[in-house]
Image: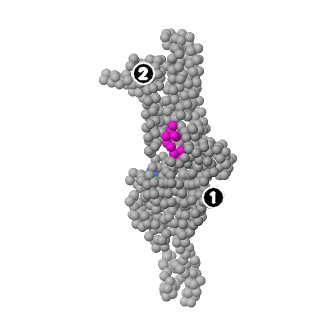
C-alpha cells in the first residue's frame, strides 16, 4: 500500500506535481495516466525518495522510504530512463544491487531467466537494445521479490510480443497480492491491464476511479446517420423524441438509440439513408478530453500554457458525460 | 471489492548495514573496465618513470650527496596521481552519467552509507596498489643508484605507506569533487587544475607584493607536498610542510570536501 498526501513538487516557478493525494492498493494493477509532462515520473521519483517533495508526504506501508530496511524487498521500480551502468554486464549490474540488500546471488540468475536475458547475462548492458534494457530494468525491480512494483512506462520501446509479455507479467504479479503501480500515456494500454485508474494533468489529480467505472461512464455509444434528405430526417428524429447532434461531413449522431430503431424510423418516413452505423467513443478520446485543459506540450507549439495555464484550475473534464467519475481538486 | 491478501517477500528482511554496501561497491569497482585501465596505467607510470629516472641518475654519476634515491619516485607518482584522480571522479560521477545512481539510492536510501562504502572501497584499493608499487619502485631505485645516501627507516615509511596514503587521499578528494559536480569531465578538469594550477600561477607572480602568496603556493601546492613527503623537509624553503605533514593536511582537506559532498548528496534531488 502506497499513500500520497498533498504531494507537491516545484522546480523553480514550475509546479510539476500539485497537491496529489491518492492511495495505491494491493492486489490490483493501478494505472497512472497523464499526458507528457503531467508529472508522472516526478511523482514516482518522489515515491522512491529520489526527489525531495516541496511539501506533502509519501508513505509505503506506513513508513517513509528512508526508513525501509533493505528496500528492494518491499518495493521494486523501473524508472523511465535507463538506470544501469552500461560498462557492466547485466549480471554484475544486478549482483551489486542484490548485495546491497543481502539478496542471495542465485536470485540474480532467476530474475535474468524470468525476463529472458540469460543468454546475454555476461554481456555489457551498453550494447542492449531498447527492449533488452527495459527487460533488465524489470529484472532489477523483481530482484527482491517485493510486495510493491512500480513501472514507469514499461512498454516503451517493446515490440508487440514484449508488450504482451509485460501485460501478463503485471497481471500475474497482481494476482499474487502485490501492489502494482504502472504509468502510461496510452489509455488503450491501461484499459487492458489496469483495474484501477489514476489520471493526472499538469500535476493535478483529475480522476481516481476503477477501470470498470471509467469504461462504463466513458464509452458512449451512439448511432451515426447520413442522409441526402437531411431536413426531413431531422424532423422525423425530433418528432420521435431523439436529440440528434450535428457532426462533421453532414452526419448526425444520435445518443441512446439502436440502429434497428432508427432504420425502421427512416423506412416509415420513406427516407433514403447513406449511412446507418453503431459507434462507440474510444477510451482514448475520453482520456484526451479529460486532460485537454491540462496538456502541457501541444504538437503545433502555438498554445503552450504557462505554469498558471488556463483550464487547470477549472473543475477538470467538465464534459457532461463523465462528470461523475472525476474528482474536483 | 474483496480485500486481497498482501504479498510479502519470501526473502527475509534484516537490518541493512555498511557491510552490505561495501560488498556492493566492491562488485561495482571490480566489474568496470575503467578501474583496470586507470590503475594499470598508474602502475605502469610509477614503475616506468621511476626506473627510467633511476637509470638516468645512476648513469650520469652526478653526486646526490646526502639525498636518498627514494625521492626519484616522485616523478612517476605525480603522473600516476592523474590516474587516481580520474578513477576517484569516475567512481561516483559515472553513476550520474549513466543514471545508475538512481538505482543505487533506491536500493540503499542512506546517502551516508553509499558514500562511506564507496570511499572505503576506493581508499583501500588505491592505498594497497600504490603502496605496493611504491615499495617495488623504491627497492629498485635504491639498488640502481649507488652514489646516494642510504634511506632512513622514516624515509622508507613515508616513501611507501606515506605515498600510498597521500595518493588515496587525493583520490578521495576527487571522489568528493565528483559527487559535488556530478559530471565526469568537469570534475576531472577541476581536479587537474587543483593539482597543477598553484605551481603554474606561482611561476607568474613576479611582483614584489605577491612574494608571500608565491611562497605559500610553492610550499603548499600538491606536487611540493609530495616532494616534502619524500624528502622529509619542506620542498622549497623552510616554512612549508615537512615529514608527515602533507598526509595530515590532505586528510583535513579531503574530510572537509567529503562532508560537503555528503551534505549535498543528502539534500539534492537525484
Ligand atoms: N529536474 C527537473 N528540473 C526542472 N523541471 C523538471 C525536472 N524534472 C521534471 N521537470 C518538469 O516537470 C514536469 C513533469 O515532468 P515529468 O517527467 O514528471 O512528466 P511525465 O508525466 O513523466 O511525462 P512523460 O509522459 O513525458 O514521461 C515537466 O514539465 C518537466 O519539464
Ligand atoms: Mg515520464
Please give the name of the residue rendered at 45% of the width and 33% of the height, measured from the top-left corner: B255
Quadrant showing the N terminus of chain B = bottom right
Please give the name of the residue rendered at 58% of the width and 42% of the height, measured from the top-left corner: A100
- Toward the right, the furthest residue is A119
Q: Within 10 angstroms of label 2, few (less than 14), some, or many (20 or more) residues?
A: many
- SS at circle 1: loop
Residue A176 disc label = 1
Residue hosting label 2: B241
Q: Is residue A216 magenta?
A: no
Q: Within 10 angstroms of label 1, few (less than 14), some, or many (20 or more) residues?
A: some
Main SS of residues in magenta: helix
Q: Is residue A187 left or right of residue A306?
A: right
- SS at circle 2: loop
Q: Is residue B91 visible?
A: no
Q: Position of residue B52 (x, y in %)?
A: 56, 19
Q: Nearer the viewer, residue B230 or B124?
A: B124
Q: CA distance from mark 1 to mark 2?
A: 66 Å
Q: Position of residue A34 (x, y in %)?
A: 50, 60
- Toward the left, the furthest residue is B209
Which of labels 1 and 2 is toward the front? 1
Part of the protein shown in magenta: B106-116
Q: Is residue B108 magenta?
A: yes
Amino acid at each position: 500500500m502506497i499513500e500520497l498526501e498533498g504531494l507537491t513538487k516545484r522546480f523553480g516557478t514550475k509546479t510539476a506535481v500539485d497537491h496529489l493525494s491518492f492511495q495505491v492498493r494491493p492486489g490490483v494493477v493501478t494505472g497512472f495516466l497523464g499526458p507528457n509532462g503531467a508529472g508522472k515520473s516526478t511523482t514516482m521519483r518522489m515515491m522512491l525518495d529520489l526527489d525531495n517533495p516541496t511539501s506533502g508526504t509519501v508513505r509505503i506501508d506506513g513508513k517513509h522510504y528512508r526508513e525501509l530496511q533493505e528496500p528492494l524487498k518491499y518495493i521494486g521500480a523501473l524508472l523511465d530512463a535507463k538506470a544501469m551502468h552500461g560498462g557492466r554486464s547485466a549480471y554484475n549490474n544486478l549482483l551489486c544491487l542484490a548485495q546491497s540488500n543481502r539478496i542471495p546471488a542465485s536470485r540474480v540468475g532467476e530474475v535474468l531467466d524470468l525476463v529472458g536475458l540469460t543468454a546475454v547475462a555476461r554481456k555489457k548492458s551498453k550494447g542492449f537494445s531498447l527492449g533488452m534494457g527495459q527487460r533488465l530494468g524489470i529484472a532489477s525491480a523483481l530482484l527482491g521479490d517485493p510486495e510493491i512494483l512500480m513501472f514507469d512506462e514499461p512498454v516503451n520501446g517493446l515490440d508487440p510480443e514484449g508488450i504482451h509479455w509485460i501485460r501478463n507479467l503485471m497481471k500475474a504479479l497482481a494476482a499474487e497480492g502485490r501492489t502494482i503501480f504502472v504509468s502510461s500515456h496510452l489509455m488503450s494500454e491501461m484499459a487492458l491491464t489496469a483495474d484501477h485508474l489514476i489520471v493526472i494533468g499538469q500535476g493535478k489529480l483529475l480522476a481516481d476511479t476503477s477501470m470498470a467505472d471509467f469504461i462504463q461512464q466513458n464509452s458512449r455509444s451512439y448511432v451515426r446517420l447520413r442522409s441526402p434528405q437531411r431536413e426531413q430526417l431531422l424532423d422525423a428524429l425530433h418528432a420521435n423524441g431523439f436529440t440528434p447532434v450535428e457532426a462533421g461531413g453532414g452526419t448526425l449522431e444520435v445518443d441512446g438509440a439502436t440502429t434497428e430503431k432508427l432504420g425502421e424510423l427512416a423506412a416509415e418516413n420513406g427516407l433514403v439513408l447513406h449511412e446507418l452505423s453503431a459507434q462507440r467513443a474510444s477510451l482514448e478520446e475520453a482520456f484526451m478530453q479529460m486532460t485537454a485543459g491540462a496538456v502541457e506540450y501541444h504538437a503545433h507549439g502555438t498554445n503552450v500554457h504557462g505554469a498558471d495555464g488556463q483550464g487547470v484550475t477549472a473543475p477538470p473534464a467538465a464534459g457532461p458525460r463523465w462528470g461523475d467519475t472525476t474528482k474536483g481538486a | 471489492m474483496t480485500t486481497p491478501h498482501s504479498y510479502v517477500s519470501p526473502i527475509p528482511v534484516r537490518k541493512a548495514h555498511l557491510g552490505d554496501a561495501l560488498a556492493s561497491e566492491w562488485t561495482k569497482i571490480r566489474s568496470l573496465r575503467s578501474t583496470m585501465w586507470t590503475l594499470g596505467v598508474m602502475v605502469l607510470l610509477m614503475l616506468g618513470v621511476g626506473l627510467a629516472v633511476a637509470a638516468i641518475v645512476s648513469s650520469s654519476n652526478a653526486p646526490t650527496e646526502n639525498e636518498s634515491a627514494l625521492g626519484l619516485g616522485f616523478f612517476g607518482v605525480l603522473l600516476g596521481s592523474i590516474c587516481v584522480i580520474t578513477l576517484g571522479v569516475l567512481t561516483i560521477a559515472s553513476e550520474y552519467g549513466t543514471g545508475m545512481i538512481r538505482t543505487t539510492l533506491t536500493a540503499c536510501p542512506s546517502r551516508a552509507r553509499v558514500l562511506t562504502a564507496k570511499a572505503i572501497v576506493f581508499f583501500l584499493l588505491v592505498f594497497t596498489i600504490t603502496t605496493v608499487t611504491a615499495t617495488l619502485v623504491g627497492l629498485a631505485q635504491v639498488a640502481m643508484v649507488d652514489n646516494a645516501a642510504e634511506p632512513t627507516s622514516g624515509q622508507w615509511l613515508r616513501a611507501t605507506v606515506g605515498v600510498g596514503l597521500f595518493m588515496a587521499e587525493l583520490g578521495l578528494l576527487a571522489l568528493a569533487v565528483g559527487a559535488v559536480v556530478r559530471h565526469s569531465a568537469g570534475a576531472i578538469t577541476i581536479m587537474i587544475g587543483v593539482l597543477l594550477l598553484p605551481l603554474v600561477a606561482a611561476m607568474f607572480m613576479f611582483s614584489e607584493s605577491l612574494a608571500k602568496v608565491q611562497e605559500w603556493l610553492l610550499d603548499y601546492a600538491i606536487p611540493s607536498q609530495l616532494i616534502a613527503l619524500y624528502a622529509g623537509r619542506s620542498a622549497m624553503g623552510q616554512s612549508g610542510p615537512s615529514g608527515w605533514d602533507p598526509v595530515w593536511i590532505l586528510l583535513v582537506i579531503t574530510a572537509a570536501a567529503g562532508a560537503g559532498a555528503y551534505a549535498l548528496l543528502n539534500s539534492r534531488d537525484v
